Amino acid sequence: MDLFLYVLMGVLIVAANVLGFLSYRKKKSLYSASLTVLLMAPVLGGIGGVIALLIIRDAFAIFYGLQVAYFLLVNSAIILVIAVITSAVRKYRAT
C-alpha cells in the first residue's frame, strides 16, 4: 500500500512539472512555469487526497494530499529561485 502511494506521489509531482514545462515552452518564461506549478499544487494535492481516501478509506488519508501539495509548493519555490537567478545572470551578461 505504501509503495502505491509513493508512486502516486511521484506521478503527481512529475505531472505538475510536465505541465510547468509545457507552460514554459509556450510562453518562454520561467516565471509562468513556476506559477503553473504553484497553481497545480492545490489541484493535484486534492486529487491525491481523494485517491488516497478512496484507497485507504480513512479520514486521515486527506493528509496525504496535503503532503503532495506541500512538496509541489516547495518544488514551485525552487523553480522560482531558478527563474530569479537565471534572470539576474541574463541581465548581468547583457550589460
Image (cartoon, helix red, strand yellow):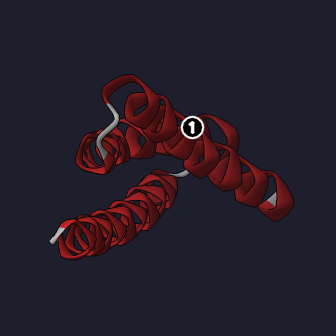
Residue 10, position in %: x, y? 68, 54
The type of residue carrying mark 1 is Val
Vertical relation: 55 (above or below) 76: above
Q: Residues within 10 Å of mark 1 (few under 14, many from 20)?
A: some
Which residue position holds label 1? 18
Point 27% across, 72% down: residue: 93
Can residue 57 be seen at all in this image of the molecule?
no
Asked whether, in this view, residue 95 is left or right of residue 73, the answer is left
How many numbered dots are placed on residues in this image?
A: 1
Between 28 and 11, the one nearer to me in the picture: 28
Point 69% across, 40% down: residue: 55
Quadrant in which the C terminus appears: bottom left
Can residue 85 be seen at all in this image of the molecule?
yes
Residue 17, position in %: x, y? 52, 46
Quadrant in which the N terminus appears: bottom right
Residue 69, position in %: x, y? 39, 56
Point 81% across, 51% down: residue: 4
In the structure shown, which secondary structural element does the residue marked by tag 1 occupy? Answer: helix
Res 2 quadrant in image? bottom right
Between 48 and 91, the one nearer to me in the picture: 91
Residue farthest along the front direction in this orientation = 95
Point 36% across, 46% down: residue: 37
